[in-house]
Image (cartoon, rainbow, N blue to C red):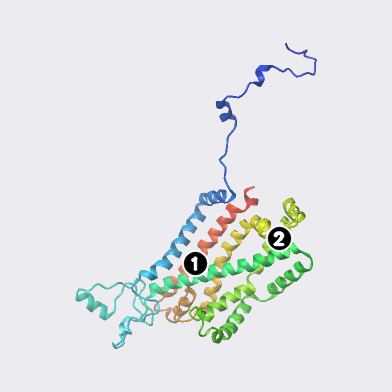
Amino acid sequence: MANNPLSMQVDLDPNDFLPASEEEKEYMVQMRPSSTFFRDGCKRLYKNKVAFISMIVIILITVASIVLPMMWPYSYAKQLGNQPGRPVDPSFNNLAPMEYSVSEQERMEAGESVFPHIFGTDSSGRDYFIRVVYGTRISLAVGFFASIIVLVIGMTLGSIAGFAGGRVDMVIMRIVDIIYSLPDMLMVILLASVLRETLGPILEGTVLQTIGSNIIALFVIFALLYWCSMARLIRGQILSLREQEYVLAAETAGAGSGWIIKTHLIPNCISVIIISTALQIPNAIFTESFLSFLGLGVNAPMPSLGSLASEALNGVTSYGYRLVIPAIVISLIVLGLNLFGDGLRDAFDPKLNA
């Protein structure tokens, strides 16, 4: 029976409360499949074509720098014109791209197959292509390992400063301010010069001697100077998270500070950590290339992209391509890593996807 129009009672018609059919449920409710934060971030990263292509380029360069030296017939340190038991052949020196020496041309005329020098040879008769490939491997390895060192130190000190607060936070942040006040490049050059002379005698006869004192000095420089930005970033994230209810509940339950940081705070900062680490790698590669260009990088005859560019300056008017090739590779790596880091930031930063 219908209610009085002036009545305030609701007209409870039974037909209005019939269960919805399956078709009506599918139409009214759009169910989204369950997902995770990492999976959603990967989907957004895949949709960013520039970042995805940059990631593919970096992967291809990394794989090529690892695989090609195993397959290439020439070594980065072997002087092709200086064969044991034979007189020195100067025709191997300063070969142009795809050019052959006199002895190689004679072997080809005799019917032998000779592997080409794609980028020619340097002034010492060493195959330049494999030196560029091996230099790319060294630069990438220094960049990745230096970024890991910066990540570990910055994440540890930043999380301690943010969670502990008080005097601990003040001491760590004043150390950061002091390091920031130092002239960056001047300190890097001075430390590289001092550590190269200091670490040399210490590393003799050890496993680290094969790596070289200059590479170890580079890692020490990053451990001393380049963790400050990461520490500040992690500290800011921890300060915003330590007042959350789940942190207070863990403290009330008697959980220790280290357990709370490892279990609750660091996992909630993982997006910022990934993005900052990805953007730190090109900075480390550029610093290594800069120091190698000044002669403070890797030990000879081991090449890096910076040392190859430095060596090419001696014959830049006659063999300008030797300077252009490592410069292009450095630019390609740094640009690819920067674009990939920007893509990670856009994909995994919750504030940008809110």
Q: Which residue corresponds to the image point at 52% horizontal and 85% vertical from the top-left?
A: 204
User: Residue 184: x and y, percent?
Assistant: 64, 75
Furthest residue in direction front, as rendered = 254
Q: Earlier in the sequence, mark 2 or mark 1?
A: 2
Which residue is at the front of the view, 318 or 337?
Answer: 337
Distance from Cα at disc 2 to Cα at disc 1: 32 Å
Name the mark on residue 331. Answer: 1
Name the mark on residue 233. Answer: none
User: Residue 115: x and y, percent?
Assistant: 29, 72
Choose mark 2 or mark 1, whichever is in front: 2
Relative to 93, does residue 242 appear above or below in the rendering?
A: above
Amino acid type of the residue tagged 2 in the rendering:
Gly
Q: Which residue corresponds to the image point at 69% horizontal and 65% vertical from the top-left?
A: 158
Left or right: where does residue 115 sit relative to residue 323?
left
Quadrant location of residue 168? bottom right
Q: Which residue corresponds to the image point at 80% horizontal and 16% vertical from the top-left?
A: 7
Q: Is residue 296 visible?
A: no
Left or right: where does residue 194 sit relative to residue 100?
right
Q: Tag 2, which secondary structure?
A: helix
Relative to 17, does residue 205 appear above or below in the rendering?
A: below
Give the labeled residue for mark 2: 236
Amino acid type of the residue tagged 1 in the rendering:
Ser
Left or right: where does residue 334 sit relative to residue 349?
left
Furthest residue in direction top, as rendered = 1
